[in-house]
Amino acid sequence: MNDKTLHEITNELHQVIGYAGLLRNDPQKYEAYSNLIEQSAYRIDALARDLCQTKTEAASHTPSKQKTVMIRNALQGKQILLVDDLVENREILQQIFSTLECNVESAMSGAEALDLFERYKPDIVCMDIIMPGMKGDEATRLLKEAGCSARFIAVSALKEHPEKDLSIFDAWLPKPFTIDQILDTLASLDLCTVEHHDIAASSGSVTLDDLSEDEKEQIINSLQKGALSELEAMTAELPESKSKTWLDEQLSHMRFETIRSTILSP
């Protein structure tokens, strides 16, 4: 087990125990302490799941230069809003988006994001789900009601949250995230698609009949996660066919929506 990760898990567990004691002694601060306990629990879950990843899996998620260049070309100059109560998460995302030559603003709460929206109109919003006070899904709903037309990425350790509506998001970025996962998630938004006429023509001429229903379902599941590396590995294992050649071509240009619509078409 990685010593650093073990230390982080132990530290989070100590925080949970400490917050539970404070909550017991001061029940009037129930919401504040229960939020802190919940955040620590999600971080422990993320750290534990990260330990299950092998070195081979980690190596396979090294972002390619081609992928980075394509996404940079598509996102250059875009307005990005990062909403997360943890400064380290905001700093990591800000560094990535700055490298992609985006304009970046950040907020440490949903309420701050709403205030910021009055003067900053984002193209993409990365929204933490579990935050003190206003949760990410509520902040996203209020931003949309205020007229925000950005693409929203849910940033969370878990894709399923009881009593939280994640259907309002366009994509999901898991915690802890890697650079490659961020790039894959951005690719899943189809902001990198620029050859619209070619896409329309290619999707209408392919049926993918030589793929099994299980293979199609696996591809759709990976598309929903924005998992480009996973899709590339899956396609590489397919037998040589027209479908494999077509999928390789679409993935090379990150045409996620083209693949999805073609598989789901009657």
Image (cartoon, rainbow, N blue to C red):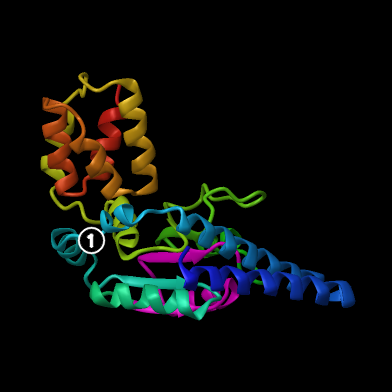
Give the residue at x 13% y 59%. 66
Q: Residues within 10 Å of mark 1 (few under 14, many from 20)?
A: some
Say whether residue 3 is magenta. no
Percent of width and height locating residue 29: 82, 75
Asked whether, in this view, residue 38 is left or right of residue 70, the answer is: right
> Does 225 appear above or below 213?
below
The C terminus, quarter of image: top left
Q: Which residues are magenta?
A: 104-130
- As for residue 106 lying within the magenta part, the answer is yes
Q: Quadrant of residue 209?
A: top left
Closer to the camera in the image, 32 or 124: 32
Looking at the image, which residue is at 28% across and 70% down? 78
Residue 149, image quadrant: bottom left
**Residue linked to disc 1:** 63
Q: Nearer the viewer, residue 84 or 22?
A: 22
Q: Identify the residue at image location x=62%, y=64%.
A: 135
Above or below, 113 against 224 in this view is below
Residue type at mark 1? Answer: Pro
Is 196 situated above or below 2?
Answer: above
Can residue 205 be seen in the rendering of this structure? no
